[in-house]
Amino acid sequence: MKKTVFALAVIAVAATGPAFAGDAAKGKKVFNKCKACHVLEGNKKKPGPSLEGLFGRTAGTHESYTKYSKAMKNSGVVWEDETLRAYLAAPKKYIKGTKMAFAGIKKEADMENLMAFLSETLK
């Protein structure tokens, strides 16, 4: 009986997937680190591109943003959960030559919360 309950608990956690592992409300606070350069929707003038339509988009292709580095434009990266996590953890290591001046999200809890917020807001 205990094994069955444990197995069902594991299945329930796995079924939620990584996008739901964090707390979106806490992730909104983590996003404050991003707001100086990025907006979630529209094309408000900021140092970085709008994140509207981010998931599934190829890096360096937002039509209203013209200041991408050559490295970003030529990266071939498609923004999905895995690639975005890797990039946000260490932008300059993930895409060498990127112009994004951000040290990265270092705490795993912050990353989980931010990804939950972005997933809920942008997908």
Image: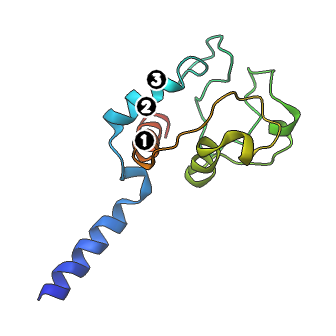
Q: Distance between the residues labelled 3 and 1?
A: 12 Å
The picture places residue 104, in percent across and down from the top left corner, at 59, 38
Q: How far apart are marks 2 and 1 (CA)?
A: 6 Å
Question: What residue sits 44% from the left and 34% below the top?
Answer: 121
Name the amino acid, label 2: Val
For this view, does 7 lie left or right of residue 46? left
Q: How far apart are marks 3 and 2 (CA)?
A: 5 Å
The picture places residue 70, in percent across and down from the top left corner, at 88, 34
The one nearer the camera, 101 or 35, is 101
The one nearer the camera, 109 or 119, is 109
For this view, does 92 lie left or right of residue 25? right
Tell me, yes or no, whether the two marked residues, 3 and 1, touch with CB atoms within 8 Å.
no
The picture places residue 74, in percent across and down from the top left corner, at 86, 42
Report the residue marked by disc 2. Answer: 30
Q: Residue furthest top?
A: 45
Please say if 18 is above or below 45: below
Report the residue marked by disc 3. Answer: 32
Question: What residue sits 27% from the left and 68% below the top?
Answer: 12
Residue 58's tag is: none
For this view, does 24 lie left or right of residue 41? left
Residue 110's tag is: 1
Name the amino acid, label 3: Asn
Tell me, yes or no, whether the two marked residues, 2 and 1, touch with CB atoms within 8 Å.
yes
Disc 3, SS: helix
> So how many labels did they put on this image?
3
Give whichever of discs 3 and 1 has the lower sequence position.
3
Tell me, yes or no, whether the two marked residues, 3 and 2, touch with CB atoms within 8 Å.
yes
Question: What residue sits 83% from the left and 30% below the top?
Answer: 69
Image quadrant where one finds the N terminus: bottom left
For this view, does 55 lie left or right of residue 66? left
Name the amino acid, label 1: Asp
